[in-house]
Image: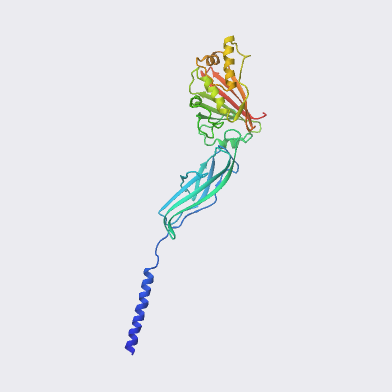
Amino acid sequence: MKRKFDEICVCVALFIIGLSAVSCSEEDMTNYATVGTFGEIATDRTFIGTHQWFTVTVSYQSGENVALEELLFSTDGGLGYSVAPENGKLSVLVHFTQPGKHTLKFSARYGGVFKDGYDRNIEVTREIEVAASDIRCHFWKETREETLRNLAYYSTMKELENSSGLSIAEKDVYGSIDYSSEAHMDGTLPSASLHDLQADRFVYYRFDMNNCLNEIQYYCVPKNQAENKYVQNFYSRIRYLKSDYDFDACMYNSADIDLTQEEKSNVEALLAKINNGEVVEDTDGGIGSLMKSNGLVLLSTFKSKDGKTSGTIGTYYDKERGEFAVLVGFKPYGE
């Protein structure tokens, strides 16, 4: 009986050891991946205008045991572009050309073995409000410090002598909207007119006694300096600006220069076309020649359709430099 009992005990012990071995062999030893985490999206501007650059930042904790981790930033549901973390944060520079509500989004894509699958995506979003700037990337009466901040990404920005203002130099290339443009394209200009607009542009910022922005002046030097192309360049700028500004009749300095009756007739016929919105050409360069030799000046005033800005646009020939230019001045409406 004792021998039989001992045999039974051995069998039971072996059975228990067998169960234990099976249990250990079936234990899940997989080192599963886990996704990262985003914090809340922050911006370095509390009030944002169109064409104003600002920094978007979010804290980020990386995922663990992932085979792939791709971090992206996008706006308004558009395609995202890659961003890299630095010191536990993701930061990007952003600007918007259109006012209204806009959505900022950081997202992450992961590849790896998760407990309930193989790939994962996470994201964090924030909606912001962008106001329509008064002129370019500025608001009238903003402080000098704010103007400097708005121009921070211009490598050509410099102080004028005696701290009377600021200036920047930029390529005056039209056809795409960016924060250096003074108006939005309305799609009505033919490609030839867009070519006429190409110039080097110098922009000057003036401030009032309280050191607040109250004037912006443009000095535009057309790439094509031919006498028979200057009028087209001048009028193309008026047509371009008409998308955002209402113009008064274009005039000339008739009381300040001596012209023959034929020359007066030619100038007045040209002005009639400009004021009627007709195609303007100076094929023989006669008008351009009068600007160069007789001091002829064409001039028009305008007001922005939003009622915030008024200004003037005029022709100019610099005898010392021997170059045609277009002068455009902007001021707060009513000043």
Q: How far from the left and from the top, in percent, is residue 114?
A: 43, 58
Q: Quadrant of residue 291?
A: top right
Residue 329 in view in this figure? yes
Q: Is residue 59 left or right of residue 275?
A: left
Towards the viewer: 108 or 210? 108
The residue sitting at 52% across, 50% down in the picture is 124
How many numbered dots are placed on residues in this image? 0
Q: Quadrant of the N terminus?
A: bottom left
Residue 295 in view in this figure? no
Q: Quadrant of the C terminus?
A: top right
Q: Is residue 25 left or right of residue 334?
A: left
The residue sitting at 44% across, 49% down in the picture is 70
The residue sitting at 34% across, 82% down in the picture is 10
Q: Is residue 323 left or right of residue 144?
A: left
Classify 88 as above or below 157. Answer: below
Towards the viewer: 93 or 282? 282
Q: How far from the left and from the top, in percent, is residue 233?
A: 52, 22
Q: Quadrant of residue 144?
A: top right
Q: How far from the left and from the top, in percent, is residue 292?
A: 54, 15
Q: How far from the left and from the top, in percent, is residue 290?
A: 55, 14
Q: Residue furthest bottom?
A: 1
